[in-house]
Amino acid sequence: MGDPSSIDQPAWSVRLWRYLDDPHRGWVSLLYSDAQIAGIAGTQIIGPYRFTPVDEAAGQRSGRLRPVLELASWFRYPNQQPAASGSAGWTGLSIHQEVGALASLVLGVRLRGDDPRPRYRQQDGDVTSYEVSAQVVPSAPASPWSSPILPGLAGSTADFGSLQPYLESLPHLAPDHTVQLVRAARQYADALWMAEGAPELAWLMLVSAVEVAATAHQAATEDYALLVKKSFPISAEALIATGGETLLAKAADAEFYKLVGATGRFLAFAKKFLPNPPDERTTDQAGQLPWSKTKMSAALEAVYKLRSARLHAGTAFPWPLLIPPPAAGDGLPAEVFTQDTYGSGDTTWPAAELPMTLAVFAHLVRGMLLRWWDTLAEERALPNSSG
């Protein structure tokens, strides 16, 4: 993932906060979703971005992909700001894609933008937008099932008001944290977008979203020089003999952090930022995922092992994890698998090998990432609040 300390500039969408407006040229993009966006009556300005609700077309049913928000910004030029160096801070996304991914994470809905269109403000103040030659409208993979793999997502309602404090915190965060937030948000947003048609990829992306954040969190909190002294004493002595504690610290932060166990890092992050259970969940206790840190850790470790087997051995995820969740005793979607075994074709899986449904894992990942984001914002606000 690269050394977080080598990221010297924030994510592209965050750098835009520092720049000077050119009020005559800009861009606009439509954000598509199958959810409803409430809490925004007119244009809402958040930093360099302008969000405007888009009315649903007459006769278009709820839950269908459609434009729900217009995202726009005027072009901005660096105000003697240095360009980002190297690829350490590269997210692979354009500005409007970064903002869309962050909004998808905060709002907990599918959200993806079309190609941005240029717009110009004329001398009389009128703003004109121009269509691009080959406009691509986002479309999500179709589900082969009659019920959703992520129940309650399509047709849900998200509060736009929850987005503002998160976006406004971004310019105050450390540059590397903004980049890692965007990367994690991208994995989460892509997972939601393709879950119904490619659920196995959604599992992989959700685990990766946590790994991105866990690596960034560990890099910010671990004393790697001390870790090297304990775990690699001969290497530590050689480094100190060559360049003193300074060289040891540099090598530890730049390279040795990669040797820390990935599974332990994943589970430690999950334990620290474990969110509350879903607000709406089955009342059937047999269908609930136990929400204690000990039992949750075991379930998440099982998920991580399935992901590792898929990446490193090509072992497919168990079939029951790739279909809509079973119904609990009250008819609501279950969070775990309660039958003795589940099968497909000539293959069966005992319930013990099926840690949780994709829907509840998506809830966990979003909650972890938002709690981590909250912590980052609180830590950056502390010096100002005490000064």
Image (cartoon, rainbow, N blue to C red):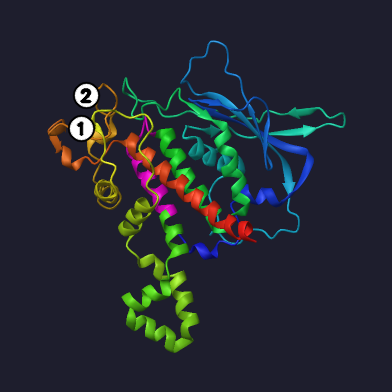
Residue sitting at the far top: 59
Give left or right: position of 279 versus 322.
Answer: right
From the viewer's perspective, is residue 384 above or below residue 74? Answer: below
To which residue does mark 1 refer?
A: 286
The stretch of residues the image draws in magenta is: 195-213
Label 2 close to label 1 by CB (< 8 Å) = yes
Say the numbered circle drawn on residue 78. Answer: none
Label 1 secondary element? helix
At horizontal 57% and vertical 11% (from top left) the residue drawn is: 58
Say the numbered circle drawn on residue 329. Answer: 2
At horizontal 73% and vertical 53% (from top left) the residue drawn is: 78
At horizontal 17% and vertical 37% (from top left) the residue drawn is: 351
Residue sitting at the far right: 123
Residue 261 at x, y percent in the picture = 32, 62
Q: Quadrant of the N terminus?
A: bottom left
Is 207 inside the magenta-drawn segment? yes
- What secondary structure predominates along the stretch shown in magenta? helix
Q: Quadrant of the C terminus?
A: bottom right
Residue sitting at the far bottom: 241
Give left or right: position of 120 versus 183.
Answer: right
Q: Amino acid at mark 2?
A: Gly
Q: Is residue 94 visible?
A: no
> In front: 256, or 129?
256
Label 2 secondary element? loop
At horizontal 60% and vertical 34% (from top left) the residue drawn is: 115
